[in-house]
Amino acid sequence: MINAFKHMCRIGGIMAIAMWSMQANAAGTPTDKVVEAFMELDQDASNGVSMPEYMSMVNRRARERFARMDQNHDGEVSEDEYRHFWQTQKARWYRLHR
């Protein structure tokens, strides 16, 4: 993005800066980004996310999280495994301050 900004400055000055700024803000607000990511779950182009589409994502994330917790891959998470997971991975999986 910075290289694009430098290039635009060389070719058009103020107008280029304005265009770069508009492109940088085109992604929208943080809420827009979250909503856009959520709507990507809509696999059948119905303009809505069904329970099965949503649960597909939830189940995928739960499997990924469980695999990270189950360090010895025995299909169970022991107290020590969960303690280790919590101490090393909690920031990646959980928002503690809402």
Image: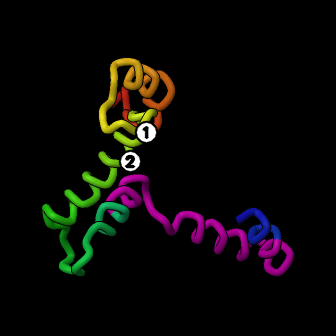
Which type of secondary structure does the marked residue at label 2 adopt?
Answer: helix
The front one of 6 and 36 is 36
Q: Quadrant of residue 55?
A: bottom left
Q: Residues within 10 Å of mark 2 (few under 14, many from 20)?
A: few
Label of residue 15 in the image: none
Q: Which residues are magenta?
A: 7-35
Q: Quadrant of residue 75?
A: top left
Q: Which residue does the image show at 13% across and 61% down from the upper left?
A: 51
* Farthest-out residue, front: 74
Within the magenta stretch, is there residue 61? Answer: no
Q: Which residue does the image show at 64% across and 74% down from the upper left?
A: 19
Q: Position of residue 86 (x, y in %)?
A: 42, 24
Here the colouring is: rainbow
Q: Quadrant of residue 34?
A: bottom left
Q: Amino acid at mark 2?
A: Glu
Label of residue 68 in the image: 1
Which type of secondary structure does the marked residue at label 1 adopt?
Answer: helix
Label of residue 64 in the image: 2
The front one of 40 and 2 is 40
Q: In which quadrant is the N terminus drawn?
A: bottom right
Q: Position of residue 12 (x, y in %)?
A: 79, 79
Q: Is residue 64 left or right of residue 10?
A: left
* Farthest-out residue, left: 51
Q: Which residue does the image show at 58% across and 70% down from the upper left?
A: 22
The dominant secondary structure in magenta is helix
The front one of 78 and 30 is 78
Q: Position of residue 94 (x, y in %)?
A: 37, 34
Q: Which residue does the image show at 36% across and 54% down from the upper left?
A: 31
Q: Amino acid at mark 1?
A: Arg
Within the magenta stretch, is there residue 34? Answer: yes
In this view, 3 is above or below 75: below
Q: In which quadrant is the C terminus drawn?
A: top left
